[in-house]
Amino acid sequence: MLLKKRQKDDVEIEGSSMADIAFLLLIFFLVVTTIDVDTGIGLVLPPIPDDVEPPPVLERNMMRILVNAQGMVLMDDDPTSIAEVRQRIMDFVANPGNDPNLAETPDDAIVSIKTDRQTPYNVYIDMLDEVMGAYNELRNQASQERFGVPYTALEEDSPQQEQIRELYPKRISIAEPDEG
Amino acid sequence: MSKFQKKQANTKENIPTSALPDIIFMLLIFFMVVTVLREVELQVQVEFASAENIEKIEQKRLVSYVYIGPERLGGGEFGETRVQIDDALIDDMGAIRNIMYDKLMEEPRLIVSLRVDRESEFGIVTDVQQELRHAGTLRINYSTLREI
């Protein structure tokens, strides 16, 4: 009789609440998760100069950008709006008309950035963004002409990408800050 | 017609839910793996600037963060702009050089990610950059969000 009773019993564990428990845990992790975005504008700082004088740079090969304390952008001493920066950098680097005041070759072109102590950070970032945009656009154009695809579509560190990078190297330099 | 109705009445309408816990567990495990519990307690307020021409840092192990922004004083008030590296606020700018030099020795391909509050002035960033140059950590990255 006892045996008979046991056979009748259902020995299954109730599994329907499992989903609820899992849901609770899921919601906890959903709330806690912050998928971190690590994006930004990369730059290489110039090393601390030795006592050796840096090699002279021709005035025409240097684009001096100053972002002053009022958040004004001055390119070679002309006040420039942020929106114009990209076109001016592209003209300066590529120099399609062989203007004697602009860079000799893209390889010689140096963009030198100078800031004041009171320069607003977001203006600086906007300006740097435009400079990077100018280089990206030039690289995309060159890549489109040579390989028929934009630079970003080329394989990372492929010889083609290397070639474009050599054609338009990003020579962006942070000028020495003033003393005091 | 009557035949059709009968057929419909006979079909069972429950959706089998026995696989539901498995699905939920899979999602759960995904989020558990993805989650990074915040490693550093931020003591400064950092609101990112945004930019269009940005790049992703693929190798996160190489990155070391420097936070620059107004100090959080509690009660929603902010103090002066300070620099935070790892868990500590930096009082003496000269200390950055040593901290960064040590980090560079451990990881020669170090990238320093500068997380600077968008409202700050550039002077303090210049100071940090000068220290980084002295330390020899020349690869930097200004953390920005993608502009929408």
Image: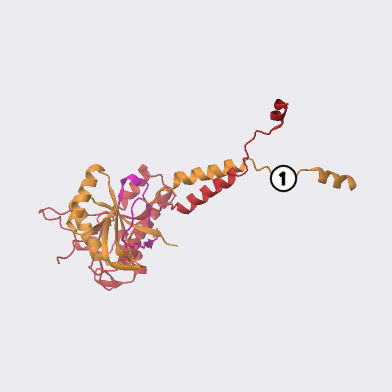
Chain colours: A red, B orange
Q: Residue at x 37, y 42 (%)?
A: A158
For disc 1, the neighbor class at 10 Å (few under 14, some 14 to 19, many from 20) is: few
> Subunit of mark 1?
B
Q: Residue A140, how many percent across, how many down?
A: 40, 54
Q: Which stretch did the figure color magenta?
A: B39-64
Q: Is residue B12 above or below residue A45?
A: above
Quick one: B94 or B125, which is closer to the camera? B94
Q: Tell me which amino acid carries mark 1.
A: Asn
Q: Residue B55, how many percent across, how many down?
A: 37, 53
Horizontal placement of A4 versus A31: left or right?
Answer: right
Q: Residue A48, how many percent across, how many down?
A: 16, 54
Q: Could you tell me if residue A90 is visible in this image?
A: no
Q: Residue B133, how many percent across, how many down?
A: 20, 54
Report the magenta stretch's main SS. Answer: loop
Residue B51 in magenta?
yes
Q: Could you tell me if residue A73 is visible in this image?
A: yes
Q: Residue at x 70, y 28 (%)?
A: A7
The residue identified by callout 1 is: B14
State how many labels appear. 1
Residue B88 in magenta?
no
